[in-house]
Image (spheres, grey):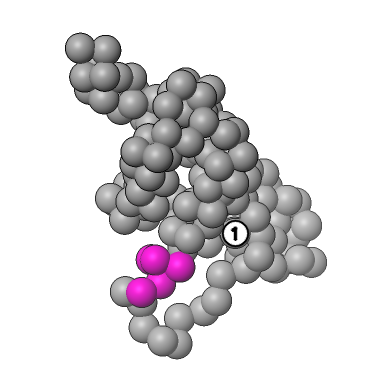
């Protein structure tokens, strides 16, 4: 009965809270990037472009495509009973950083490349989400 309660209640709630923590980090760091780009008044267009790319990617987080790598990470961690914080933190960062690469599969070949700032923000958000999941459910896998 304990395993069933874990699968039905704890894991989905922990995953949802980890996803919300990641979204919070993306929004807050993305907003900071946009503000820095606006404050520079055109001197550094790369920062502003990265902020707009983050905004566009934020809209793609509403799709299941964004949750699939993180969900795969959680399933592997739970089945293999991995309890290490390093697995969830680094895996969360990698799972979220791969989302722009997955979204580019449906774009034409001539689409502009994403800046490094976008990948940095997404990796940090994934680190935060992985840590939150580990705190709630991963350390007791």
Q: Which residue is mark 1?
A: 119
Nearer the observer, 107 or 47? 107
Residue range corresponding to the magenta coloring: 101-105
* Quadrant occupied by the C terminus: top left
Classify residue 42 as left or right of residue 129.
Answer: right
Asked if residue 26 can be seen in this view, the reply is: no
Q: Residue furthest bottom?
A: 110
Reply yes or no: does residue 85 show up in magenta.
no
**Residue 1, relative to residue 77: is it above or below?**
above
Looking at the image, which is closer to me, 68 or 31?
Answer: 68
Residue at the (59%, 46%) spot, across then down = 90
Residue 110 point in image, percent of width and height: 45, 87
Give the farthest residue toward the top.
Answer: 1
Q: Is residue 77 left or right of residue 134?
A: left
Rate crowding at label 1 as few (under 14), some (14 to 19) or many (20 or more) other CA atoms within 10 Å. Answer: many
Q: Is residue 128 above or below residue 60?
A: above
């Amino acid at each position: 009965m304990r395993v069933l309660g874990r699968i039905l209640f704890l894991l989905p709630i922990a995953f949802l809270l980890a996803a919300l923590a990641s979204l919070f980090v993306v929004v807050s760091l993305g907003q900071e990037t946009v503000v820095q780009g606006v404050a520079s008044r055109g001197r550094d267009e790369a920062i502003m472009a990265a902020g707009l790319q983050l905004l566009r990617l934020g809209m793609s987080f509403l799709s299941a495509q964004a949750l699939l790598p993180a969900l795969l990470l959680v399933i592997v961690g739970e089945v293999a009973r991995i309890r290490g914080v390093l697995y969830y933190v680094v895996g969360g960062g990698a799972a979220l950083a791969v989302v722009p690469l997955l979204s580019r599969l449906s774009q034409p070949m001539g689409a502009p490349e994403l800046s490094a700032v976008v990948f940095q923000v997404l990796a940090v958000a994934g680190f935060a989400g992985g840590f939150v999941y580990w705190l709630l459910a991963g350390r007791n896998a």
